[in-house]
Image (cartoon, helix red, strand yellow):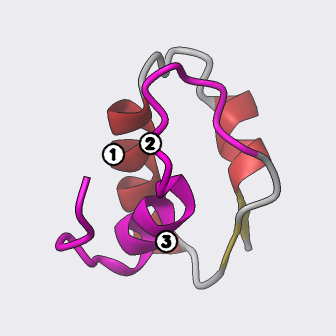
């Protein structure tokens, strides 16, 4: 299981929400489940951040920004 907090701890170089989405998409290739256990700390985190992260994990790219 992939935890969002784990991603944030392991990837200190992430500076934007868009970069986080890319990492989640990449990590989804080797994980079966995704747990959103914290809110991303980036200033550009959108209101629908949970939907966008889940979409990135399952490969849905049509979630509006």
Which comes sooner in the sequence, label 1 or label 2? 1
Furthest residue in direction front, as rendered: 47
| 31 in magenta | no
In the structure shown, which secondary structural element does the residue marked by tag 2 occupy?
Answer: loop
Please tell me whether residue 24 is drawn above or below residue 16 in the rendered image: below
Q: Can you tell which mark lies on residue 2?
A: none
Query: Residue 21: percent from the left, percent from the top?
Result: 39, 48
- Pointer 1 local density, CA inside 10 Å: few below 14, some 14–19, many at least 20: some
The span picked out in magenta is 39-65
What residue would you read off at disc 1?
Answer: 22
For the residues labelled 1 and 3, the Cα–Cα distance comes to 12 Å
Chief secondary structure of the magenta portion: loop
Q: Quadrant of the N terminus?
A: bottom right
Query: Residue 54: percent from the left, percent from the top?
Result: 49, 71
What residue would you read off at disc 2?
Answer: 46
What residue would you read off at disc 3?
Answer: 54
Marks 2 and 3 close (CB-CB < 8 Å) = no
For the residues labelled 1 and 2, the Cα–Cα distance comes to 15 Å
- Pointer 3 local density, CA inside 10 Å: few below 14, some 14–19, many at least 20: some
Query: Residue 5: percent from the left, percent from the top?
Result: 78, 45
7 on left or right of 23: right
Total numbered labels placed on residues in the image: 3
- Pointer 2 local density, CA inside 10 Å: few below 14, some 14–19, many at least 20: few
Residue at 62 percent across and 18 percent down: it is 12
In the structure shown, which secondary structural element does the residue marked by tag 1 occupy?
Answer: helix
């Amino acid at each position: 299981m992939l935890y969002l907090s784990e991603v944030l701890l392991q990837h200190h170089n992430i500076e934007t929400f868009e970069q986080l989405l890319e990492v989640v998409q990449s990590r989804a290739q080797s994980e079966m489940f995704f747990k959103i256990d914290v809110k991303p700390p980036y200033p550009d985190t959108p209101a629908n951040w949970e939907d966008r992260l889940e979409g990135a994990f399952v490969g849905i790219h049509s979630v509006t920004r």
